Amino acid sequence: MRKIKIVPPVCPLCGATARYIDSVAVYGTSFGMMWLCPTARCDSYVGAHADGRPKGTLAGPELRKARRDAHAAFDGWWQRARISRTKAYITLSRVLGIDDAHIGSMDIPQCEFVVAIFTANPIRDRETPNQYVRRLAARNSTLSTHAVRAGTEIR
Ligand SMILES: [Zn+2]
């Protein structure tokens, strides 16, 4: 069997190294393993893949809500657009100007940016993800302001 060395993730709120625990401790029911910040007031955690790798970065309540909102906006967008999940994530990465974008790794400004973009700018009929991104990038300063705030750049 191949052994994967996993570096325990760090809590972005307090800097403590997360503990690898069964999710029953947080949810009351086990949904597998997770990474939890040992500092109780952080209430900060992230799920784990079967091999133990964290599914993104640890998040406290505020960031978890921001990620849920971003997911709702983004999933609604690509499902209405009838494009594949894969294409949707490529588009998301291009819009944010980062490689291999995942909402589980985003911070609050990035989540807010995702909500602003994908809620306010639905993809048009027959528009490809590339055309969509180009249309957004060519447009108003609000988008670039959001991008700057989110620390990213539309390209
Ligand atoms: Zn913490």
Image: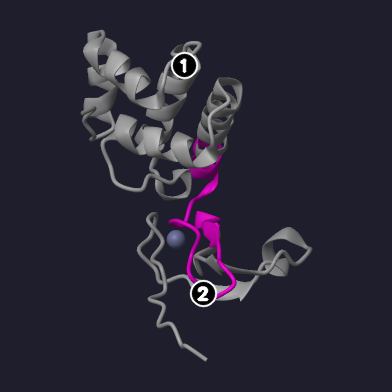
Task: Give the residues drawn in magenta, as a range.
Answer: 41-66
Q: Position of residue 150 (x, y in %)?
A: 29, 32
Camera-side residue of 88 and 20: 88
149 drawn magenta: no
Residue pictured at 53% horizontal, 59% vertical: 46
The amino acid type found where label 2 is placed reads Arg
Which corner quadrant of the image does residue 11 belong to? bottom left
Residue that lies at the very extreme toward the top in this rendered image? 140
Measured Cα–Cα span from mark 2 to mark 1: 41 Å
| Vertical relation: 31 (above or below) 117 | below
Q: SS for tag 2?
A: strand
| Mark 2 residue CB less than 8 A from any atom of ligand 1 | no
Q: Could you tell whether 149 is left or right of 41 in the image?
A: left
Which residue bears the numbered disc 1? 123
Q: Position of residue 155 (x, y in %)?
A: 20, 28
Q: Position of residue 92 (x, y in %)?
A: 39, 34
Q: Mark number for residue 19? A: 2
Which corner quadrant of the image does residue 101 belong to? top left
Residue pictured at 31% horizontal, 34% vertical: 94
Q: Position of residue 115 (x, y in %)?
A: 46, 25
The amino acid type found where label 1 is placed reads Ile
How many neighbours does mark 2 have within 10 angstroms: few (below 14), some (14-19), or many (20 or more)? some
Q: Colour scheme in the image?
A: one colour
Mark 2 or mark 1: name the one nearer the start of the chain. 2
| Vertical relation: 45 (above or below) 17 | above
Camera-side residue of 96 and 62: 96
